[in-house]
Amino acid sequence: MDELIEQILSLWETERGQISQIYSSVWEVNRDCVIKVYENKEQLERNVRIGEILSDFHIPVAKIVPTKTGEQYAACQGHYFLMTEKLSGSNISDLKDSEMARKMGAAIARLHVAFAQCEKELAFWDNSLLEEMKGWVRENLAANEWKILGEEDYTRTVSLLEAVYPSLPEQLIHRDVHFGNFLFFEGSLSGYIDFDLSQRNIRIFDLCYFLSGLLAEETEDAFTKEEWLENVESVIAGYESVLPLTETEKKALPCVMECIEILCAAYFAGMQDTKHADDACRVFRFLQSCENDI
């Protein structure tokens, strides 16, 4: 793929220079542009349209660099290549900074406000966390003979979700919210990236995915219970400074976070990745211990 990207650079008005892979499907070019490789043309075109709509609502997203012939992207050997200007800023390094956590919550809310407008312009995959939990998630856990996670824990958590699900607001969400997809420059949000998984779902999925994801790494600098709960409070306060949550959403936060970790455990179990499945279960147990505090 490195060689192919070298070849197709001639399609753009850009000099051949330093090229480095920064993610599995993303290459940085000359430090000021980024090329992302897609296998699915429809997904690329949808993401381009999402970017255009978000830009109209003054949401900072990467600007497309057209080819020499004015095309938005290039196709070669069954792959599709999209070049964008590199957004300023970087990922947050201090995950425990409560002020940055508040800004992250506000950033998620502003994205949700803009995403609500996107729904009027485009058709999106209409997904349901509850249906996933009752479908492939249960099938994967059962196929694993409930060794990764016990059936009693699964049933209790899904029952809690099912009881509140009809009352949880749904809309277009990012679906992959983590610090890696939000850029900050000098303390302020400078850009949103990666809309590949965007879908209609319950809106607190994004908040819950982000908050439970903070617990995923078990390192020396891992969150204590007190530190994480402080982060939860800051993120929610930031979100509500832009967009209020309903009381049902607030009460459902622990349950939805637990469901997301069960989903992750089932996914990794299906991939025969025992380590990451066990990690997800570890986070699930931690979340269970925090239910009343949350």
Image: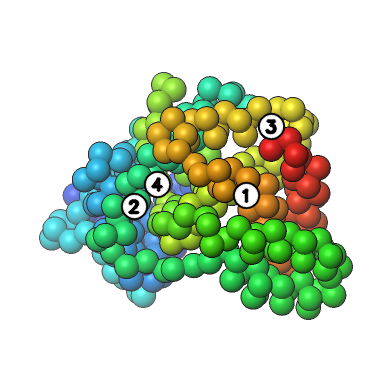
Proximity of marks 1 and 2: CB atoms separated by less than 8 Å = no
Name the N-terminal-most of marks 3 and 1. Answer: 3
Q: Nearer the viewer, mark 3 or mark 1?
A: 1
Proximity of marks 2 and 4: CB atoms separated by less than 8 Å = yes
Name the N-terminal-most of marks 4 and 1. Answer: 4
The amino acid sitting under disc 2 is: Ala
x, y percent for residue 48:
28, 58
Q: CA distance from mark 2 to mark 4?
A: 6 Å
The amino acid sitting under disc 3 is: Leu
Image quadrant assignment for residue 133: bottom right
Identified at 52% across, 30% down, the residue is 237
Specify whether 274 is left or right of 201: right
Q: CA distance from mark 1 to mark 2?
A: 21 Å
Q: Which residue is mark 4?
A: 112
Proximity of marks 3 and 2: CB atoms separated by less than 8 Å = no
Q: CA distance from mark 4 to mark 1?
A: 18 Å
Identified at 41% across, 57% down, the residue is 171
Q: Nearer the viewer, mark 1 or mark 2?
A: 1
Specify whether 167 is left or right of 139: left
Mark linked to residue 229: 3
Q: Nearer the viewer, mark 4 or mark 1?
A: 1
Name the N-terminal-most of marks 3 and 4. Answer: 4
Name the N-terminal-most of marks 1 and 2. Answer: 2
Specify whether 165 is left or right of 230: left
Identified at 62% across, 49% down, the residue is 252
Image quadrant assignment for residue 60: top left
Q: Which residue is mark 2?
A: 116
The amino acid sitting under disc 4 is: His
Q: Is residue 106 above or below residue 180?
A: above
**Closer to the camera, 157 or 47?**
157
